[in-house]
Image (cartoon, rainbow, N blue to C red):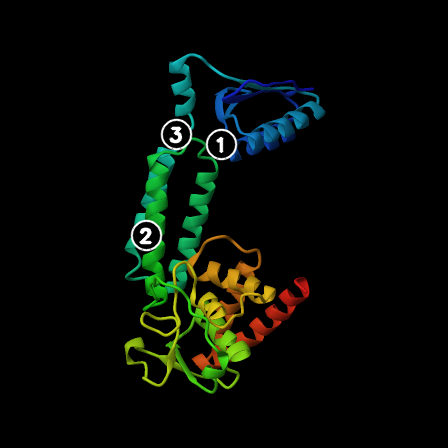
Amino acid sequence: MYYYLHMKNWLLLILSLPTANATVRMRVWRALKAVGCAVLRDGVYLLPQREPLRALLEQQADEVSAAGGTAYVLSFDTEDAGQQRRFAGMFDRSEDYAKWMSELTALDGRLATDELTALQRAFKALQRNFEALSAVDYLPGAARQQAAQALAELKTRLAALCSPGEPQAAAGQIATLARAAYQGRRWATRQRPWIDRLASAWLIRRFIDPQAGFLWLADPQACPADALGFDFDGAAFTHVGHQVTFEVLQASFGLQQDAALQHLGKIVHYLDVGGMPVAEAPGIEAIVRGIAQRSTDDDALLAAAEKIFDDLYLAFAEQNP
């Protein structure tokens, strides 16, 4: 049995378990450790007042009670300024961020020497660790802000290595164009295309210019005058504002009303520049990386990617009739 008294600011879990019940004790301890509880003394745990945290403490209290122990969940405030500071200090994650920053600095130093695959894998682990630390940083301050900025800057530097020449977003409106004027053309983009360029090439061939041919450029500045460039600085179609090239092509040719393309566009956006996560994105990223590794040239890579995008489009169309 547990009792919940509502006041504000802090949550307290007081529990006691029979000594013999080591399994439940360990399970509860791990759950409280994972959520970042401060330990006031054995069996007494503190958290800031948050609705999800209160639900978690109540869940642990239920488990303790079911195992024959006692547990009390209390919500309280303190009028003692010194005690308030001490409680808040128990949730200062500055040292954790400092340790994390040392890992980021070490990874940053590897950019010039390590293989891209290893760097990307290490960056994802670093990002996961930051997200886990942020999740238990209930009173965030300057340390979290500094860490988030450092992570964003490292992501930019790594992206520049992975995709040299990645376009910078341009300002301005997106004009609506007539597809009839863009038939049988040669389209050009940077070689070794990744998700935005692959998806854009698929979109061009499937919805804009069915007879499109593609030129893969080692140097975007050498794009032929008669070719329509996409996804590089100065190209006819590239990032505009917060929109990636795939989304710009959608808007340019009046394809925004297609729900399946909209869904695919969210995935491309997330994988290319980040933003709101999309459930299917990690699986699609893994598939595209796989076909990129076994494709002998960029035409073969696009041909394989087109099959993936065709299947995704059909699946999303069924979800959004």
* Closer to viewer: mark 3 or mark 2: 2
* Residues packed near mark 2 inside 10 Å, few (<14), some (14 to 19) or many (20 plus): few
- When the figure is inspected, residue 168 is found, relative to residue 191, above or below; the finding is above
Which residue position is annotated with label 3?
92
- Type of residue at label 1? Gly
Q: Are marks 2 and 1 in contact (CB under 8 Å)?
A: no
- The x and y percentages for residue 286 are 52, 64
Which element carries disc 2, helix, strand or loop? helix
Q: Earlier in the sequence, mark 2 or mark 1?
A: 1
Please name whichever residue, 165 or 43, is drawn nearer the observer in this view of the structure.
165
In the rendering, which numbered label is found on residue 153? 2
Give x and y (percent) for residue 7.
Answer: 55, 18
Residue at image location 49% in from the left, 32% down from the top: 36
Front-lying residue, 303 or 267? 267
Q: CA distance from mark 1 to mark 3?
A: 11 Å
Label 3: which secondary element: loop
Q: Amino acid at mark 2?
A: Glu
Q: Look at the image and tell me in which quarter the N terminus lies.
A: top right
C-alpha gap between disc 3 and disc 2? 24 Å
Kind of residue indicated by mark 3: Asp
Looking at this view, name the residue that lies furthest to the top.
80
Residue 165 in the figure: left or right of residue 70 = left
Q: Secondary structure at mark 1?
A: loop
Which quadrant would residue 257 be assigned to in this image?
bottom right
Q: How many residues crowd mark 1 within 10 Å: few (<14), some (14–19), many (20+)?
A: some
Residue displayed at 42% across by 67% down:
174
